[in-house]
Amino acid sequence: MAKLNEEDKQSAGFWVTKEAPIVAANPIPTATSEAPDILRCAYMELIVTDLAASREFYVDVLGLYVTTEDDEAIYLRSTEEFIHHNLVLRKGPVAAVAAFSYRVRTPEDLDKAVAFYEELGCEVRRNPDGFVKGIGDSVRVVDPLGFPYEFFYQTEHTERMSWRYDLHIPGELVRLDHFNQVTPDVPRAVGFMQNLGFRVTEDIQDNEGTVYAAWMRRKPTVHDTAMTGGDGPRMHHVCFATHEKHNILAICDKLGALRKSDSIERGPGRHGVSNAFYLYLRDPDGHRVEVYTQDYYTGDPDNPVVTWDVHDNQRRDWWGNPVVPSWYTDASLVLDLDGNPQPVVARTDDSEMAVTIGADGFSYTRDDEGEKGFKLGNTL
C-alpha cells in the first residue's frame, strides 16, 4: 500500500488500482503445464461429528434442500442450484473440511489439473466414478498451501427450486457464493492462485506492505475464495448468498425464536470489503457459515482492485462495529486425502487482530479527522 498514489484514493476511503501480482518472498514455482479452467466454487465437503445436529442446523434452520441422505452423509443444495449438491455433511470423528470443490469448464480440464499439480509435486488422486455421490470423474489434490481441493465436470442434475415458492422460507439461501481460507503467508497464496487463473478483486494492506487478506474470483463476483492471514491451512468459512438483506434479518429472528441465538457469531452488518450485507454463524461443530448478499459485478477485464488500509475501521464492518476476536482466531481444520488433519503452521507476519484490536487498538473511521477520527483502545 505504500506505493499507492493519493490520486487513486476514492471518496469512500479505499484505493483502486489495476491488478498486479502481490509479491511473495517465497513464491510457489509457476507450473509450465496449463492450469485447469475453473468456472466457480461448487461445493464443500464438511466432516461433522453429529449428523443429526448438523441436519437440524442446515436443513431445519437454514433451509437447505436435501438431495439425498443416508446414515453416513447428507447432500444439500441451495435454491438456485441444479447440480447435485453444494454441501456434503459427512459423519466423522474430527470436525474438518475434506474438500474445497470447484467445477471446471470441460472434462479435459481434469487432465490439465492432474498435469498441473503433479508438476508441482502435489499429491494427486483421480476417481472416474467420483469421490462423492452425484459427482462423476474427479481429481482431488493437496495443493502447495496444504488445502484439499477437488475438480470435477460431470455431475447429476437435480431440480432447481427457484419456482417452488411454496417451499421457500424467509431466510432462503439461493446459491453457494464463496469459500474463505486461512493461510500464514497471504502473498504466497495469492501468487499461486493467480497462477491457477484467479483474479484479485480486493485486499487489505498496511503502509509497510504487509498483506493481511485478499479476495479472489473466477466467476464475475467479488470472490470464489478469499485468502485470510492466520495460522493455517484452515477453513475460515463457507458462504451462501441470499437475495435481500431482509433474508438475513429473518434468519436472525428465527434463531432468536428458537433460542439458538448463540449460533450468531458476528453481524448482521455490512462489509466495507465487498460492500455486502453479512451474517456469520457457527454450526454445531463450530464450522463458520456466512450468509451474504448484494456484492458487485467484477467480470470486466479491467475491473479495478480495491485496497483497504488495515487500520480503516470500516474495512471489515462499514458501520465501524468491532470484530469479535473469535472471528480472527477460530477456523476449521482441513484434511489430507487420507482423512488426516493437516498440521497447522503459525503466521509470522503481523496479525490483523493484533494491529487493529490489540493493545493499542489503533484504527480510524476517517484518517483525516484528527483525534476525533481515531479509536484508541475502543474497538472492543
Image (tube, rainbow, N blue to C red):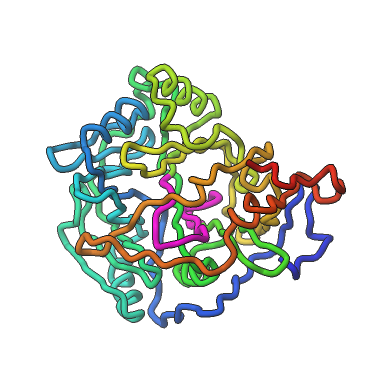
Q: Could you tell me residue 41's position as x and y percent?
A: 40, 52
Q: Nearer the viewer, residue 248 or 364?
A: 364
Q: Could you tell me residue 154's position as x and y percent?
A: 25, 54
- Residue at left 29%, top 67%? 141
43 lies above or below 189: above
- Residue at left 58%, top 61%? 212
Task: Reply yes or no: does residue 165 show up in magenta.
Answer: no
- Residue at left 36%, top 56%? 102
Q: Is residue 108 visible?
A: no
181 lies above or below 145: above
Decide if residue 18 is on the left or right side of residue 85: right
Residue reaching furthest front?
359
Decide if residue 191 is on the left or right side of residue 317: left
Which residues make up the magenta segment?
A: 217-238
Q: Could you tell me residue 224's position as x and y percent?
A: 47, 53
- Residue at left 34%, top 17%? 166
Q: Nearer the viewer, residue 330 or 122?
A: 330
Image quadrant containing the N terminus: bottom right
Image quadrant containing the C terminus: top right
